[in-house]
C-alpha cells in the first residue's frame, strides 16, 4: 500500500503515485489549468539541459529544492503558481525532492495515475471501474511515512469501495481508510498536524496547505506515460 | 517511530521493541510467569548449539518458523504455552521469524524495553518518568507495516502523554495514537482485521489472538541487556 514497492512488484499492476505536499497537487493543478504536459525530471541540471536542447518547445521550468524556487526556474513547487495564464498550452519540466522521483520509480507499472486530494475521488472511482490490482505509492518525505499521503490513499480507497464492492488492502490500507474517515471534512487540520505541513507553515506557505487540502475539486485523471504526465482522454 | 531505525540512530536513545503477534507478548508472559531469562536467538541451529554447550543450564527451547513449532523445540511461539508450571526458574532460548531479530537489531540503544499490549501502559508510564528520546521499533512481519504493532505503539504513546505532558512524535506516531484511541476497548477486533491476525486465525490460533489483545494485564518492564531479556528490578 504505502511507499514505493520495488519495480518488479509493479509489473501487471496499476500504480497510483501520491505526493500531496506538494508535487502531485501541483501537477494536477497545472494540467487542470491547461498545461500541455508535465515531464518529471530528476535534477535541475537535467531540466536545464532538456530546455537548452529543445528551445522550440518553450518549456516552463518548475519545482523545488528544500521547498523553495530553484535559481533559474520559472516557478517553484506551489500549486498556486501554476495559473491558467502561466501554463496554458505549455509543456513543463518539473523536478522536486521526492515527488518526481516517486513518479519515475513507478514507471514499471502497467499504468501510473497521479493523484492528490484534489482528484482523489475521481481516481478512486476510476480504479473501481477498472477492477485491477492497485499499488498505491506514497512519496512521503525522504521515504518516511507521511500523514498527508496516507490520508489521500485512504480517500482513494474509500471512493474505490462501494456497498457491494469491498476493497481488500494490506494493514497500511486499513489505517489509511481509518485516517481518512476520521479527518474527512477537516483535512486541512490533518495537513497542519503533519511533519511536512508544519515545515511549510514555518516557511510561510499556509496558503499552499489549504489549497492542497481540498478534496475532490478536480475530476481529471493524469497518467504518467512515455516519460511525461498527461491527461487521460 | 515505526520500523527499526538503523543502529547508529539508536545511540543515545531508549528503544522499545514491539511484536504483538506474538514474540514480545510471549516473552512478557514467560517472564511474568517466572522464567529466569529469555535469550533472543537468530536461528534454531544456534539455539541447539547454545543448549548443547550449556547442558547444566537446562534451557527451554521456544519459538517458531512459519508460525509453528520448530522440530526438537519444547514450545512454539504461543504465549499460552509459557505457563508458570513450565517456565518458572528456567532460562529460555527463543527464536522467531521477526521478533527476535528486531530485538537484537535494537541493541545499539542505551536501553531496550520489550513491550506488548499486555504491558504497554506500564512501559508508557515508565518512559514518561524517564523523559528521554524514544525510538519505538515495530517488528512487523518481514519489515512490513503492521496494525497490531502500530496500535501498541499508540497505546504506549497515550500512556506516556499526560495533560501537562505532551509527547512529540513523527507522523507515524500521530497515526498510531489515532488508531489506539479508535480501537481502545476492542483491540481484539483490530487484531482480527490485521493481516498477521488473519493468518493466525487461518492456522486455528484464535485463542492466541485474544490473549495478545489484552491491554495492561501486566506491569512488568522487561529489558534486553547483555544478550538476554530480564525484568528490570
Image (spheres, coloured by chain):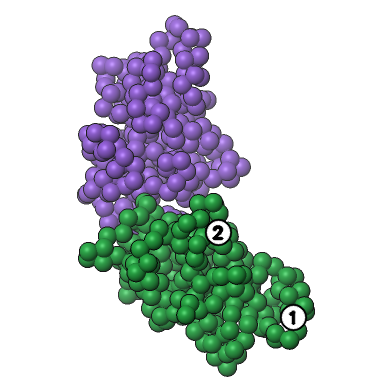
Chain colours: A purple, B green
Residue matched to label 2: B108
- Residue at 34% x, 34% y is A22
Q: Which mark is residue B54?
A: 1
Residue at 39 percent across and 47 percent down: it is: A146
Q: Secondary structure at mark 2?
A: helix
Position in image of residue A109 (x %, y %): 54, 38
Using the rendered view, name the quadrant where residue B63 is placed: bottom right
Judging depth in this view, the residue of A39 and B21 nearest the camera is B21
Q: Is residue B14 visible?
A: yes
In-front residue for pair A9/A209: A209
- The CA span between labels 1 and 2 is 27 Å
Instruction: Name the chain letter of the residue that bears numbered label 2.
Output: B
**Is residue A179 shown left or right of residue B40?**
left
**Looking at the figure, which quarter contains the N terminus of chain B?**
bottom left
Pinpoint residue A211: horizontal percent, then vertical percent.
24, 35
Write the residue at 55% across / 54% down: B7
Task: Judge whether B82 appears above or below B193 on screen.
Answer: below
Subunit of label 1: B
Which comes before the other along the chain, label 1 or label 2?
1
Amino acid at each position: 500500500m504505502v511507499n514505493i514497492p520495488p519495480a518488479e512488484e509493479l509489473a501487471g499492476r496499476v500504480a497510483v503515485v501520491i505526493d500531496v505536499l506538494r508535487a502531485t497537487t501541483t501537477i494536477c493543478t497545472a494540467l487542470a489549468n491547461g498545461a500541455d504536459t508535465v515531464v518529471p525530471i530528476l535534477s535541475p541540471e537535467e531540466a536545464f539541459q532538456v530546455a537548452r536542447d529543445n528551445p522550440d518547445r518553450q518549456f516552463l521550468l518548475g519545482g523545488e529544492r528544500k521547498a523553495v524556487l530553484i535559481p533559474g526556474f520559472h516557478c517553484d513547487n506551489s500549486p498556486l503558481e501554476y495559473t491558467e495564464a502561466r501554463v496554458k498550452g505549455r509543456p513543463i519540466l518539473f523536478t522536486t525532492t521526492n515527488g518526481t522521483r516517486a513518479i519515475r520509480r513507478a514507471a514499471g507499472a502497467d499504468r501510473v495515475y497521479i493523484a492528490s486530494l484534489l482528484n482523489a475521488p475521481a481516481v478512486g472511482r476510476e480504479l473501481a471501474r477498472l477492477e485491477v490490482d492497485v499499488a498505491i505509492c506514497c512519496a512521503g518525505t525522504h521515504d518516511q511515512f507521511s500523514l498527508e499521503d496516507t490520508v489521500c490513499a485512504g480517500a482513494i480507497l474509500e471512493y474505490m469501495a462501494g456497498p457491494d464492492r469491498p476493497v481488500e488492502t494490506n494493514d497500511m490500507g486499513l489505517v489509511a481508510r481509518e485516517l481518512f474517515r476520521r479527518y474527512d471534512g477537516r483535512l486541512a487540520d490533518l495537513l497542519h498536524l503533519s511533519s511536512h505541513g508544519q515545515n511549510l507553515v514555518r516557511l510561510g506557505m499556509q496558503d499552499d496547505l489549504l489549497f492542497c487540502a481540498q478534496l475532490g475539486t478536480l475530476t481529471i485523471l493524469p497518467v504518467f506515460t512515455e516519460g511525461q504526465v498527461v491527461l487521460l482522454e
